[in-house]
Amino acid sequence: MKKHLTILMTISLCFCLCTCGSLGNLVSFDDLATGAELAVNLNKILKEPDDFTPEQEYYIGRSVGAVIFDQYTPYTNKKANDYINTLGQALTLFSDRPEVFQGYHFLILDTEEINAFATPSGLVFISRGLLKLSTSEDSVAAILAHEIGHIVQKHGIKAIQKARTTAAVTGLAVDTANQVGAMPLPELTATFSGSIEDIITKMVVNGYSREDEKEADTVAVDILVNVGYNPGALVELLEELDKNYKPGGLDFAKTHPDPRKRIDAIEKKLKNYQHTEMSSSGPRQARFRAFYKELGY
C-alpha cells in the first residue's frame, strides 16, 4: 500500500509540473529535419548494432523521427501532448531503461490511422486514431508502455542490418567530408534520404517481428504492474484493435502481428501476476476525460 501511495504521489507530481513539455517543446521539428545535421550525425554510425553508444542511438532516432515527421502531421494541441509526455515520463521511471540519451519524448500524430512508432533514441509517436480506442488512463498507459518496451529491448537498433548500415555510412562519410560545407540544403537532404529510408525500413515500414512485439508486451505488462495500472488494459486495447484489424491494411495491420495472438500470450502471462491496482476513478479518470476531449473526440 505504501509503495503504491508513493507511486501515486509521483505520478500526481508529474501531472502538476507544467514544464514537462512535449516533443514539440523539447526538440525543434525544423531541426529534426535538417539535412546537414543528419549527414554529419550518420557518419558516426560505424559499429555493430549491439555496440551502438547511447549517443549513436540518438542520432539514428533523430533520423527516423525526421522521416516520420515528414510522413505525418503532428497534433499541435499542447494540453494533449503534455498529458502524453507526463504519463510517458512517469512510466519510463518504472522500466529497466528509465534514461536514454537526451531523454524520452512523446508526440501525438494528427491522423486517424491506427499506429504508433518508437525510435531507438526515445522518441515515441502515437496516432490520434490509436488513442481514440482508449477508454481510460490505463489504456493510454498500456499504449505508451508497449512503445517504451521496444526502446527498452532496443528493437530498433537490432533491426538495422550491418551490411546496409556500413555501406550507407561509408558513402556518407566521403560525401559529407567533400560536400557538407558547400551543397545547398535541399540537395544535401536528397543525397542522404535514400540511406535514411534504408535504415528505417525495418522499424517503420515493415514493422517489428512477432517476437519483438511479444517482448514489448512483456515489458509493458511489467511496467503497468510496477506503476499500479491495470495490466489487463493492454488486453482490452488489443481486443479493440482486433475489431479494427484488416490483414493487408496500410496502418496497424502492416506493422503489427494479429492482435489475437498477442492477447493469448499476454493472458497467459497475467496469470502469474499479483498486482495492486490503483483506482481508475477520481483524478485519474478526470485527467483522461479532459485529455480525450483535447483529442477532439
Image: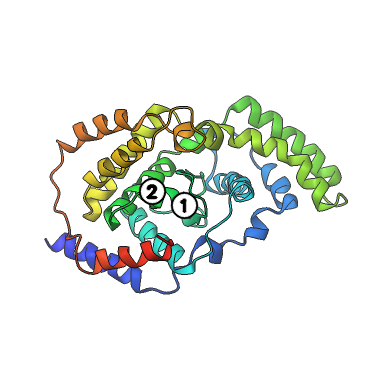
Say whether residue 77 is left or right of residue 189: left
Instruction: Give above or below for 202 relative to 70.
Output: above
Measuring 31% from the left and 67% from the top, which residue is drawn there?
287
Instruction: Identify the residue under disc 1.
Output: 100
Q: Quadrant of the N terminus?
A: bottom left
Residue displayed at 32% across by 48% down: 142
Q: Quadrant of the C terminus?
A: bottom left
Callout 2: SS: loop
Residue 181, label in figure: none
Which label belongs to residue 97?
2
Left or right: where 153 falls relative to 192: left
Give the x, y percent position of residue 41: 67, 47
Determine the CA span between mark 2 and mark 1: 7 Å
Alpha-carbon neighbours of circle 1 within 10 Å: few (<14), some, or many (≥20)? some
Residue type, label 2: Arg
Q: What is the residue that sits farthest to the top in this orientation?
A: 163
Within-10-Å neighbours for mark 2: few <14, some 14–19, many 20+ = few
Label 2–label 1 contact, CB within 8 A: yes
